Image: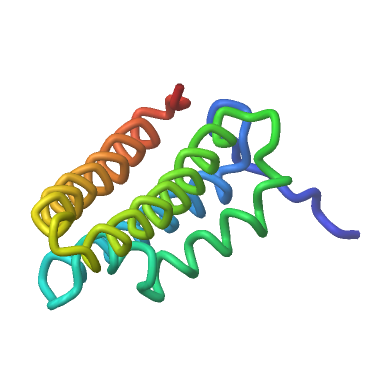
Amino acid sequence: MSEPVTVVEVNGVRASLVQLTHFIYGLHAIAVFVGITSAATVAGGFVFGLPSLCAVFLNYLKRGEVRGTWLESHFLWQIRTFWFTLLWLVVYGLLIVTIIGIPLAWILIAVLGLWVGYRVIRGWVALFGERSLG
């Protein structure tokens, strides 16, 4: 006879999904760290770095499993952070190719880097507190 499998839950969600969400925040944090410590910008490292690309892939892959739970807000937070960062990088790219827009572009990339860092930290802190975002 096989023994029943015990599923550990955290606030009504499988613990493995909470661990996965921590892992995804960790991947995003690595991308931010790479952006800070390399020639890449924080935003560039976040959007084009392999850790964040893997993280967003995992977000989309597991999104259905967290639908309707408090983790759904974290997945949406992570996905939106990625796509809005990409959008603002496009704006940055358009500004940087114009002489007049270069100073604005540098301000934008600095603010964008701070915003990405804030989003990763705020989301991860809420996850540690087992709270949803929003």
Q: Is residue 59 above or below residue 46?
A: above
Give the residue at x 63% y 30%.
69
Residue 115, x across and y down, in percent: 24, 42
In the displayed orientation, state which residue is furthest to the top.
134
Left or right of 20 on screen, residue 125: left
Residue 106, x across and y down, in percent: 12, 56
- Say which of 71 and 89 sits in front: 89
Residue 61 lies in quadrant: bottom right
Q: Which quadrant of the rendered structure holds the C terminus?
A: top left
Give the residue at x 57% y 51%.
16
Residue 63, x across and y down, in percent: 66, 48
Give the residue at x 34% y 54%.
91
Residue 54, x across and y down, in percent: 49, 69
- Say which of 44 and 133 sits in front: 44
Q: Is residue 36 above or below residue 60?
A: below
- Say which of 18 and 101 sits in front: 101
Q: Which quadrant of the rendered structure holds the N terminus?
A: bottom right
